[in-house]
Structures are given as structure tokens and as C-alpha cells.
Image: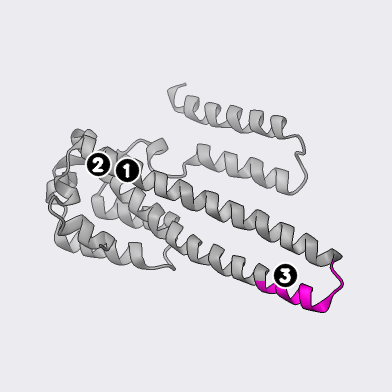
Amino acid sequence: MGFLEWLTKRKKPLSQMTRSELRRQELLLEKDRTQMLNKISKLGKDKETLFERGTKEKTPEIRRALAQEFELRTTEQLMIARQLNIRSKEMMTVSRLRMLRENPDRAGSRGKIGLVSETDMLRLGKLIETDAVRSEVYQERLDEILKIGSEIDEGAAGLSDAGQTVLNVWEKMDNGAITDQSEAFEEADRSVRERHAAPEA
């Protein structure tokens, strides 16, 4: 069953689910997404092993076989990455609908789940199924469609400034500016805490 059909035509459409039912669906999607992330990570490690073996192997036939294995694992990685992109967008949709269910006063009358139109669902379905639409772009369209935007807490609306600081720390590690993992974690944790504390000051 496609996600659009799941949204609109299943026995109980997503827009009619209770908060606890939405949370259950969110957890199922999160579990599936985690499995995909683990699979992509494992494939990456397999490729590193294959590549290292290939650098030491001098037999042409074996090198060819290793190169084919490397290519196959890369193809599998890309296929799972496309599925992961879709799953991330599905999970984001369920999370947003759950937030609307939990915060009806913030969402306003237009944001009530039951009033999300079939046209809205069609637009979401097309965005979910389009590989070229990354999660970050989908998040913006989703918030626009559901009229959440700034009415939802910044931290719950995807990658906030606090989340960006974590990415920045990882980039510093990639560039060699930070070499100690414990130090990097402490900087990321401190930065996120400071970002969350700032509005309250």
C-alpha cells in the first residue's frame, strides 16, 4: 500500500487517528528508518573492507570480482537511501499530524487534522514519492501545507539552529579541527543546551 493510500483510503485514515494511534505509527516508521540507517552503515563498512582488500590484491580476476562487489554494495546503498528519503518524509508527516493532535490551540482551526483536505494529501503524497525532494525541502512544504510553521516549537520543527550546531561540530571533526571524540561530543552537547536556553534568558 502506497503512503498516499495509507493517508487517505485505509480503514482508518491517518487524519482520523487518535494521538496514541499516530504515535504508534510514528514508532513503527522510526523503527523501519533505523533499520535502513543501520543497513546503509553496514554496507559502507563492507565497502571499506572490500576496497582495502582490493588495494592488497594483485590477481586481476580477484580484483575484478572485488570491484563488482563494491559496485553492487554501492547500488544497494543508493536504493536504500532512496527508501530512507521516503521513510523520513513519511515519519515527518505522521509526527506533524501527531503534533497537531496534541496542540490544537497552536495549530488553529485550519490546522485541525480532520480539516486537512484531500488535495493537501495528494500534494504530500507526490512530494513523498519524489526522490528529488529531500527531507529538508519536504519539511518546509509540509509545514506550509499544514499551516504549522512558527506555531510549532522550533525544536520540534526539524533541524533547528541547535541541530545545526551538531552538524557544525561534525564538520569540524571532518576537517581535523577537532580530533577528540569526547571533546566533540561535549562541544555539541554544550552548544545545543545553550541554544535551547537562549530564548528563556
Instruction: Tell me which residue sits at (49%, 61%) in the image.
Output: 80
Which tag, 3 or 1, sits closer to the chain's start?
1
With respect to residue 192, does 88 lie above or below?
A: below
Q: Please state which amino acid type lies under the numbered disc 3.
A: Leu
The magenta segment: 57-68
**Residue that numbered label 3 is attached to:** 66
Which mark identifies residue 62?
Answer: none
Q: Residue 181 sits in which quadrant?
A: top right
Left or right, 76 with reference to 87: right
Task: Tell me residue 168's x, y (percent).
Answer: 62, 43
Q: Is residue 42 above or below residue 31?
A: below
SS under mark 1 = helix
**Residue 188 appears in the picture as rendered:** yes
Estimate how packed mark 3 is, as few (under 14), some (14 to 19) or many (20 or more) residues with alpha carbons within 10 Å: some
N-terminal label among 3 and 2 = 2
Where does label 2 land, which residue?
22
